[in-house]
Image (cartoon, grey):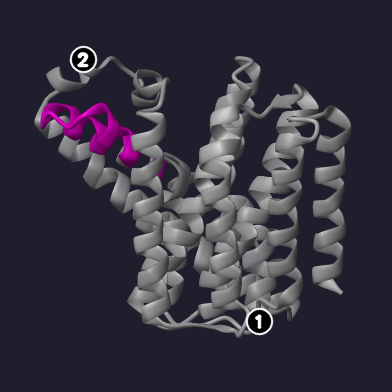
Amino acid sequence: MLFYILAIAGGCVGLYFGGDLLLKGATTIGAKLGWSAAIIGFVLVSLGTSAPELFVSAGAAMQGYGDMAAGNVVGSNVVNLAIVLGLGALILPLTIERAIKIHQLPLMIGMTLLGYFFLIDGHLGRSEGLILLLSAVASVLWAMRVDGPPADLEEALGTSVAEAKAQSSWISASQVFAGIILLIIGAEGLIWGGVGLAEIFKVPDAVVALTVTSIGTGLPEITATVLAVARRDTAMAIGNVVGSNLMNIGLVLGVSGLIAPINSAGVGNLPLLTMVGLTLVLAVLSWFPGYISRIMGGALLASFVVYTTLLLQ
């Protein structure tokens, strides 16, 4: 069992640093190629929020672990809504800005409902995967057109655009290559460790994916949100979750379904309804009262405990 736990821990580390390297390398190359701030922002949204989930779910789909591929996506979205927002709100009440609730949140709600209807029958085909992927691309491009590039673009790059352009092409390419390798290794570690623990404890793969694996792939969002809240940037904290959930279903589930049809009967109604329910709770809170209080943050964290307890029964 120790080897499986170490594989999961090592996988989490690989996914965290692999995603960071891939993001920095890709955005730096984009800056050198003269991409607009909007396009670089698109890369930040797609790679920065969902690279770990993408490699884990796509890898699981290729190996025939449909429950893990779908469970990782659904579980990651639940983790984002319950743990990431709950933890952030406990530190500092999270104000939901107008741009998020008018433009971005409706897109996330629509994508969540689409994912729910595609997964409720326990199967996701290639045509459904294609619809999800195209919907994600259209949603992000529309959001970029309406809201423009992220205001914290240079902060997300970790350097100024001018400095990014000056960086050696070899260094940028090496970052991309190293990031992909680390993501592949990290994903394999998480999949292998998760399947191994499922066999030892005699629980379905979906349960491990919905809990252990999804928390592991959600570490970048948890870290980014805590850092954003520490800087009192609550808009970025909310934006991270909204963007991540949208891309998890559209990009991650879409690409995974295109790679191989996913049989996800093990995911079940509870995780899907929890994902939809928490999404609607966020939608209501965005208007009434327009923020997530510390009390509500505690309630979100408590909801994850209840949800996990029900899963394990």
Query: How many neighbours does mark 2 have within 10 angstroms: few (below 14), some (14-19), or many (20 or more)?
Result: few
* Residue type, mark 2 in image: Glu
- The percent coordinates of residue 83 (x first, y second) are 72, 44
Distance (Cα) linking label 2 and label 1: 48 Å
Quadrant in which residue 28 is drawn: top left
Q: Which residues are magenta?
A: 23-46
Question: Residue at the location (75% across, 21% down)?
Answer: 92
Question: Residue at the location (34% across, 75% down)?
Answer: 259
Residue with the mark numbered 1: 266
Q: Secondary structure at mark 1?
A: loop
158 displayed left or right of 50 = left
Visible residue check, residue 20: no
Instruction: Specify the label residue 163 is tagged with.
Output: 2
* Residue type, mark 1 in image: Gly
On whether residue 33 falls in the magenta region, the answer is yes
* Dominant secondary-structure state across the stretch colored magenta: helix
Q: Is residue 147 above or below residue 57?
A: above
